[in-house]
Amino acid sequence: MNEMILLKLGEMVLKGLNRRSFEDKLQANLARRLHRCGQFRIYTRQSTTYVEPKDDSCDMEAALAAVKQVFGVVGVSLARACEKDKDAMLETAKTYLGERLLAARSFKVESKRADKSFPMTSIQLSQYVGGELHEAFPHLKADMHHPELTVYLEVRDFAAYVHADPEPGAGGLPVGINGRAVSLLSGGIDSPVASWMIAKRGVALEMVHFFSYPYTSPEAKDKVIELARLLTPWCGRLTVHVVPFTAIQEQLRRSCPEELFTVIMRRFMMRIAQAVALRTGAKALVTGECLGQVASQTMEAMTVTGGVTSLPVLRPCIGLDKEEIITIARRIGTFETSILPYEDCCTVFTPRHPRLRPLPGEVEAAEAALDIQAMVDQAVAGIERVQVTW
Ligand code: ATP
Ligand code: MG
């Protein structure tokens, strides 16, 4: 039990959101994520959340990896506990941070004192430990302004803690603090990235996937479930709403002009996603669309697809280049799965010459003969819900 994790919290002063709800949400998300790593005491003081193992059976390495994927945290450090005594802290700094002290050229010591009965002030403690470390590591230059390494000493209620500069956390806001959205998850590269970007802003997600069996295979569906699972360390547990889409696509192929097929199909996706949003309390839709990437991602096409829903359609990839999206996909761990070669429902019945700039009027005319509500209701009634977790 001589190590703990310290988390530095990110931005939290948002209009309408207060510090307390930020901290409560973050602590609840951390508790859920750490559940499998052991039992921890999680509490927050002065923009730092402390993750303290309750006993020696905690898997600290797994816990450290887990908290790095929790949104709302900007910095993560592993800290060593020791006795609340200046020499114990000094010895701990020498051994626990020895390698880093050897590798650095300049350093400083910073102390925080939550236990006001501790006999030295923070400044005295920093000066004492800093002076002794300087003797033990004579190559180190003391630098109060831009040190390569900062040694932190924290004197808390039951113990003191020693740690070095934090590693970056996931950033963003705790998932759930900004409500819920429905994310349209295909098997591609873009939509998992879009989902991650919106979750990062504190939004809990419901995933919707349109499945066109037998035109798309069970493996294609498994791939999407796997993508959702890969997102759960970041987004929390997810439900994937798998929508049977074959009947709608077949009907559209029979009754719509070929060049409008894709855009009309995408309007059905939006309508069905909106129905899922209504049932799950979601207040927005999320897609991986990116301006100009394919025919259905022109401004005109997006106007026409977005026109069927009154919910905002969040498209966080809209201004990113493919390379930028791929960089994020690699970083969050979805890329390798996204490029597995399975077909998507969008590639079924793809028109040879899709209309790049469809007009709302012509699309509505092409839909006039359809019983839209019945088609949507039937698809929604056939939804299969798959729960995924990390
Ligand atoms: P992605 O890489 O995310 O598949 P894409 O560049 O292939 O995107 P499209 O196939 O036109 O683009 O799809 C645009 C967006 O529509 C996707 O990012 C996704 O949000 C949604 N979408 C496409 N196909 C599906 C599907 N089968 N199920 C759910 N959403 C889908
Ligand atoms: Mg796609």
Image (spheres, rainbow, N blue to C red):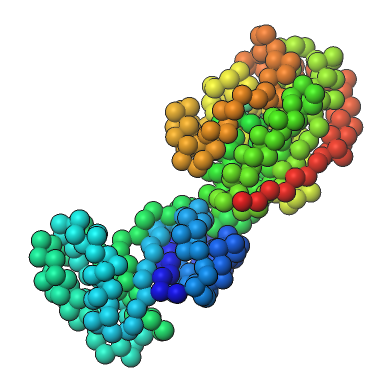
User: Is 104 located above or below residue 114 in the figure?
Assistant: above
**Image location (x, y in percent) of residue 358:** 67, 17
Question: 369 or 390: nearer the eye?
Answer: 390
Residue furthest to the front: 57
At 68% from the left edge and 39% from the top edge, which residue is drawn? 225
151 sits to left or right of 226: left
Q: How many marks?
A: 0
Image quadrant assignment for residue 348: top right
Question: 219 or 21: nearer the eye?
Answer: 219
Question: 256 or 129: nearer the eye?
Answer: 129
**Image location (x, y in percent) of residue 386:** 75, 45
Residue 337 visible in the displayed image = yes
Question: 8 or 201: nearer the eye?
Answer: 8
**Where's ligand 2: which quadrant?**
top right
User: Is 81 located above or below residue 275 in the figure?
Assistant: below
At 81% from the left edge and 32% from the top edge, which residue is drawn? 244
Image quadrant assignment for residue 374: top right
**Image location (x, y in percent) of residue 165:** 31, 61
Residue 25 visible in the displayed image = no
At 87% from the left edge and 23% from the top edge, which residue is drawn? 370
364 sits to left or right of 294: right
User: Is 157 located above or below residue 289 in the figure?
Assistant: below
57 sits to left or right of 167: right
At 85% from the left edge and 14% from the top edge, which residue is drawn? 254
**Image location (x, y in percent) of residue 234:** 55, 50
Q: Quadrant of the N terminus?
A: bottom left
